[in-house]
Image (cartoon, rainbow, N blue to C red):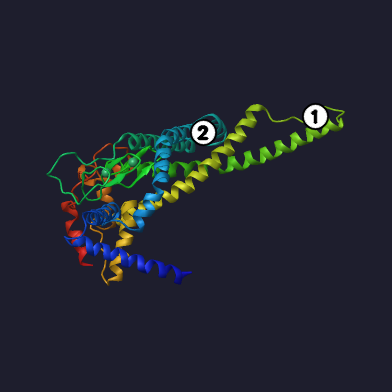
Amino acid sequence: MRGQRSLLLGPARLCLRLLLLLGYRRRCPPLLRGLVQRWRYGKVCLRSLLYNSFGGSDTAVDAAFEPIYWLVDNVIRWCGVVFVVLVIVLTSSIVAIAYLCVLPLILQTYSVPRLCWHFFYSHWNLILIVFHYYQAITTPPGYPPQGRNDITTVSICKKCINPKPARTHHCSICNRCVLKMDHHCPWLNNCVGHYNHRYFFSFCFFMTLGCVYCSYGSWDLFREAYAAIEKMKQLDKNKLQAVANQTYHQTPPPTFSFRERVTHKSLVYLWFLCSSVALALGALTVWHAVLISRGETSIERHINKKERRRLQAKGRVFRNHYNYGCLDNWKVFLGVDTGRHWLTRVLLPSSHLPHGNGMSWDPPPWVTAHSASVMAV
Ligand SMILES: [Zn+2]
Ligand SMILES: [Zn+2]
């Protein structure tokens, strides 16, 4: 079969070459010359349509998955509001259970100093959660200015067709470039970038702290509530059986009241919700703390990992230019050069601008000496 095909294709190619050769000559018939010119023009058109110096298998895969990306981006964009409402509703439900179910129980059993400690700690933690969540969802992450020539840029955004400063990335959900973009958070319905990264991290940290506090503090109540629910189920089962068999000749045993049932079920819900959020959000918070200590964002982590491997293959060492050392990275992240002590910034709610404008990344003067020592290492 292959031999037959080559027998047919060989003479056809030869004829085509002869035609092209004749087409180059001026004395060939005009019809043939026109045909050859059209053939060459068609070939150039086809090549210009398919040729791209940036093209490759990645571009082909991206193009093939473009409808799925579009769908995911739109779903996340529209679900953003739902997720924010969910966070508010779930947090409010925990606060309501704490006031309506836990408080009446601990008022009867706890000593006054213990009650005071729980009262002050829980309200301080709640204020910090609400403050940082509000700031994280309402503070814009920071966008590169339009039409300015005095900023240092490193590339052009292919989507916005605008210059991009260092550490800036395009968010396909917000559909614009974001300064020092970390990621798009559906739970905030906002991008996490230069101006709200600290609020996002503080929210994760204090929410985890609050969930651990609720989960640990309500452990004894949860165990009692769980045992009570099991007892409730058994009583209900016995009652049904008794009704079916008509064996009662006296008053049936007392069952739980509606209020008791609601309280027990609410306590179990509180413990399960707080424990699962503490585990999931705790892992996320630790991961972001590691990234901040390294002077990286979530996006830069992938880029730096690739770059580290590439340079390693060439026998060279990769160095992250935005890593000033663990302690100084945290100081830059918390904005210690804007007035207050870093500890007060962590423990008290504060609305302030972070270090720098998110476009130029020269280290602050107080970290220059340290970064120099890091570079030397
Ligand atoms: Zn862009
Ligand atoms: Zn975004």
Nearest to the observer: residue 282 or residue 31:
31
Nearest to the observer: residue 268 or residue 124:
268
| Residue drawn where x is 24% and y is 54% of the image | 31
- Identify the disc placed on residue 178: none
* Secondary structure beneath label 1: loop
Amino acid at circle 2: Ala
Q: Report whether the residue tagged 1 is closer than 8 Å to ligand 2.
A: no
Residue 288 place in picture, x, y as percent: 37, 51
| Residue drawn where x is 26% and y is 59% of the image | 320
How crowded is the residue under tag 1: few (<14 C-alpha within 10 Å), some, or many (20+)?
A: few
Which residue does the numbered mark 1 point to in the structure image? 252
User: Compared with residue 56, is residue 214 higher up or lower down, i.e. above or below?
Assistant: above
Quadrant (top left/top right/bottom left/bottom right) for the C terminus: bottom left
Amino acid at circle 1: Pro
Would residue 74 appear left or right of 327 to someone viewing this image? right
Report, in whole angstroms, how far the alpha carbon at label 1 lies from the one at label 2.
Answer: 33 Å
* Secondary structure beneath label 2: helix
Which residue does the numbered mark 2 point to in the structure image? 98
Would residue 83 appear left or right of 193 to someone viewing this image? right
Nearest to the observer: residue 37 or residue 353:
37
Residue 178 showing in the rendered view: no
Residue 280 place in picture, x, y as percent: 47, 48
The single residue placed furthest to the left in the displayed view is 150
Name the image quarter holding residue 192: top left
